[in-house]
Amino acid sequence: MTGRVIVDHIVWDWNGTLFGDNRALIDSTIDAFDAMGLPPVTRAAYQRHFTQPIPVFYDRLAGRTLTATEQSMLDRHFQESYARRRGSIELTHDAADALESWKQSGGGQSLLSMHPHERLVPLVQKMGIFDYFAEVDGLVGTQAGRKAPHLDRHLAKLGVSPDRVLMIGDSADDAVAAEACGVSCMLYHPGEDALHELDHLRGMSVPVAGSLLGAVADLLAVRSADSDCFVR
């Protein structure tokens, strides 16, 4: 997708982007595979094979197609391990500054996550950033799979034009969802604890930022220099 568009709203991803739980996600997956007696998972293997939806990712890590029962048990072990870690996870180090910087510029922002909605909302409130967002949407009921339909519903609730939106996330699925819904995208790669290998994101043909504040600063710089336009 090429051209220049006016961006006045950011849709933020949660896990691995604003919420600094990358290491917890990786370690909980390692725990789950160990509990099941499946081939050991390393951080490098996680980053090399990471994809969404998660059942496909688990198949890749296992090196075979897992049964429905195995998938269910892996998810249970993962959720238990992640829950033990959740209380010590904090926002990404510059998340609050990035949100404040964009707010001060007059831009709108919202939060879209594949995390269950009933757990997402109190967690965002606990982190003290809920009021930055026009909407906070997590998964409801049996919604699952790819992020694009979830993003499409989110944009409809916001009532914003997709061509005026930038999505900031940390996974290839964020870029795929953005393209499917006609919005711009910038991906965040936090370094050694990222979910993806850096080359995965570079191959998505979207900008990749090493920090959230840097992502917002880059956007504001381009807006200022080019009549509020962002290249996508």
Image (cartoon, rainbow, N blue to C red):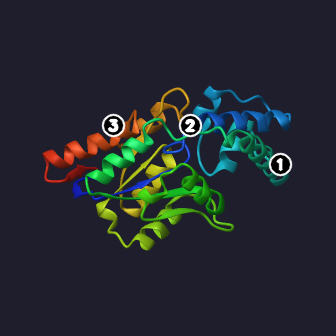
Residue 96 in the image: above or below residue 131? above
Question: If you read the primary sequence from the N terminus, does the residue marked by circle 1 or circle 2 appear first?
Answer: 1
Under mark 1, the amino acid is Met
Q: Between residues 6 and 132, which one lies in front from this camera angle?
A: 132
Q: Residue at x 63, y 67 (%)?
A: 140
**Amino acid bearing label 3:** Gly
Query: Residue 43: horizontal and vertical position, in percent?
Result: 64, 28
Frontmost of labels 3 and 2 is: 3
Please report the residue visible at 47 percent of the width from the left and 52 percent of the height from the top. 129
Which label sits on residue 123? none
* Residue type indicated by callout 2: Leu
**Going by the image, does 14 lie left or right of 94?**
right
Mark 1 Cα within 10 Å, few/some/many (few <14, many 20+)? some
What is the distance, in whole Å, between disc 3 and disc 2 at their CAs?
19 Å
* Residue shown at 47% from the left, 67% from the top: 154
In the structure shown, which secondary structural element does the residue marked by tag 1 occupy? helix
Q: Is residue 66 above or below residue 30?
A: below
Work out whether mark 3 precedes mark 1 in sequence or the reverse, and give the earlier one: 1
Identify the element where label 2 is drawn. loop
Q: Secondary structure at mark 3?
A: helix
- In percent of width and height, residue 122 lies at 61, 57
Instruction: Find residue 156 and report its image quarter.
Output: bottom left
Q: Position of residue 118 (x, y in %)?
A: 65, 62
Q: How many neighbours does mark 3 have within 10 angstroms: few (below 14), some (14-19), or many (20 or more)?
A: some
The residue that mark 2 highlights is: 195
The foreground one among 139 and 107 is 107
- Compute the Cα span from label 3 to label 1: 39 Å
For mark 3, what is the residue? 214
* Residue designated by label 1: 73
Spatial separation of the CA atoms under disc 1 and disc 2: 22 Å
Q: How many marks?
A: 3
